Structure formats: C-alpha cells, structure tokens
Image: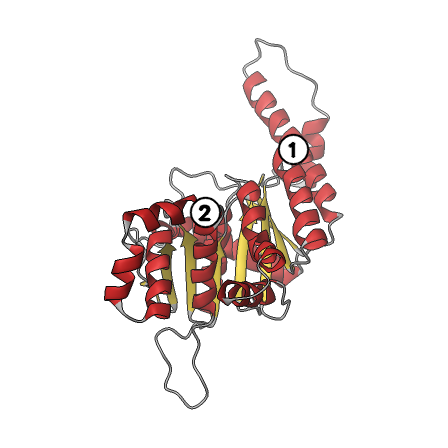
Amino acid sequence: MDRRFLLVTGKGGVGKSTVTALLAAASAAAGRRTLVCELNTQERIPGLFGKPPVGPRVTSLADNLWSVNIEPAAALEEYALMKLRFRTLYSLVFENPLVQRFVGMVPGMNDLLLLGKAFNHERERETPGDMRSPLAWDCVIIDAPATGHGVTFFRLPKVILDHVPVGNMHDEAREMWSLLTDPRRTAVHLVTLPEELPVQETLELHRTLAGQLGLPIGALWLNQMPPVWGTPATRAAFADLAEPEATSPVRGAWEAGRVRGLRENQAARYAETLAALGLPTLHLPTLYRREFDHAAVVDLLAAARAQLAGGAA
C-alpha cells in the first residue's frame, strides 16, 4: 500500500474486482485520495460501494475514494484535445468516419488508450506551493484485464518502445514503461483461487510479469479459501468416525463434512504450491451469503487486516 500506482490482475472470475475494492477501501480509510480505474468494462467497483455505474467521468464513491470507467473513445478525445488544443480541429480529424475506422483497426490501439488514460491519472498530482487540486491522487488503482489479455496489456509499452524508435508515441511509451517497472511507485497484485487452472495460470503469469517483463509484483491474494471447520480436536474426531450406512439419518451430515474436509485439504495444497513464489500472501475466506455487496467488502477487509496484524501468510 506504500506504492502510488497499483494494478490488480489474474484469471477471469477469480475476484480481481473484489481485491481492487479491498485495496481501494483500505487506501481511502488511511486518508489517501484514491482513484479506482476500471477499463472499458461492465462496472463492478461502484456497486461494491453501493453506488450506480459512473461511466467515463471521475465520480466520488465515498470519503477519499473516486471511480472511473475508462473508455477508449473518451480517452482518445481527451488525448487529442490535449495535443491539438482546439475542439474544431479535433472534430475535423477524429470525428471523420474514415479516421475512426482506421483507429479501430490498429492492433492494440484501444489498450494503448486505456493504459495512457490510467497513466495520465497517475500524473495528476499537486505541485509544491500549489493548493491541493481535486485531481491530486495519492493512490491510483487499476482493475487490469484478466490473464490472457492482461499480459498483452502490460507488454504494450515495451512493444512500442522496441518498434517505434522516435516520436511522441515513443516518448509516451517510455514514460509508461518507466512507471510500470518502477518498484518505488508501482506494484502488480496477483489474484487467484485455490483451484487447478487458476493456480497454474497464476504461476505462468508470475513468470511472465516478473521474469520476462521485470514488473514489480506486490502481493498474492488467494481468494475464496474455505474457512477451517471446527477445532483441531473436532476435526480429528470426525476423521475417526466410521462411514455411516447409506440409510443412516446422519449419512448426509457425514458426507457434507467429508467434502468440506477434502476441499480444505485441496486448498491447503494449492496454497503450498503458490508459496514457492515467495510473495506476501493474503487468504480471503469464502463468504456464504446471498449478495456480495459493500458489507462483504468490509468483512473481507477485516479478514485481511487480521492476517496482517498477525503476520501475513
């Protein structure tokens, strides 16, 4: 949490947005002016704070917390106006249907616009002697694309640097890459589940981001860990129970306990596999409830803080 630019990634469906919300809530509670960026997606973050979708305009969600859903068209308009300075000239060039089709056909253009807009938000900070600006962020958190798309997203500035030797695009890509690879400013958080495919993808993702690209990795968030059932003595006593007859009235309870134990053991094995990465790891428990809302975010944040207080996994 001491970094200014946080990115959260992992396999689709593992809880990236949940971890993004936890980081945002913790940052805001610490008094840091925090901006959460979702990238051209169906918004989840505002809903986790009891708010409607915010769209491409930076909108307050809570004390010290704002959110935005970065959209390529809005990002292109903002960037073009920043460079051209005149809306008439922007309209003449970028609202031309041929130009719009061309921009849409350029590989990676949308990703570049999304990353560029997020990068611009990171540059929004107060300068010495100035009054505090409403755009002076202490922390910018990006709910990054899922694993497959995410690797392309993270690699994009480096690809531009390697293939565009000079010019404005090269300069922008150099600054983006400098930010992404700076361990003093940036951390990439990895999110996964204690299941086979998510764990394998996380291992590969770590090899790519840390090994090949040299990005600074923050923490590993192991989501939906089954809460440990009972006391050690209770679990030992249950393990010693003989299997009931199929017609026994306690057969259902015995099978439920057996499945619960198997799931806990499986999750523990996957946690041990991920421990080989050597990352600070936080276990988020499975919450059994009808709705995953702001109350769930509060409960998970409390669980994470309890681990940190006692020494993270």
Query: Which SS class for mark 2?
Result: loop
Q: Is residue 199 visible?
A: yes
Residue type, numbered disc 2 = Val
Pick the front one: 234 or 127: 127
Q: Is residue 143 left or right of residue 240?
A: left
Q: Earlier in the sequence, mark 1 or mark 2?
A: 2
Pick the front one: 82 or 312: 82
Q: Is residue 298 visible?
A: no
Which of the 4 image quadrants contains residue 235? top right
> Which one is in front in this view, the residue at disc 1 or the one at disc 2?
2
Could you say which disc has been placed on residue 12 in the image?
none
* Residue positioned 38% across, 52% down in the render: 72
Relative to residue 254, is residue 81 depicted above or below? below
* Mark pair 1, 2: CA separation: 36 Å
Q: Quick one: label 1, few (<14), some, or many (20+) residues within 10 Å?
A: few
Could you say which disc has been placed on residue 196 in the image?
1
Q: How is the image coloured?
A: secondary structure
Which of the 4 image quadrants contains residue 91? bottom left
Check the picture and name the quadrant holding the N terminus.
bottom right
* Residue positioned 31% across, 56% down in the render: 94
Which of the 4 image quadrants contains residue 173? bottom right
Outermost residue toward the right?
276
Q: Residue 62 in the image: x percent, y percent?
A: 34, 64
Dot 1 and dot 2 residues touching (CB under 8 Å): no
* Residue positioned 61% across, 61% down in the render: 308
Outermost residue toward the top?
247
Q: Residue 154 in the image: x percent, y percent?
A: 57, 53
Residue type, numbered disc 1 = Glu
Pick the front one: 162 or 34: 162
Q: Residue 202 in the image: x percent, y percent?
A: 64, 43
Q: Which residue is mark 2?
A: 106
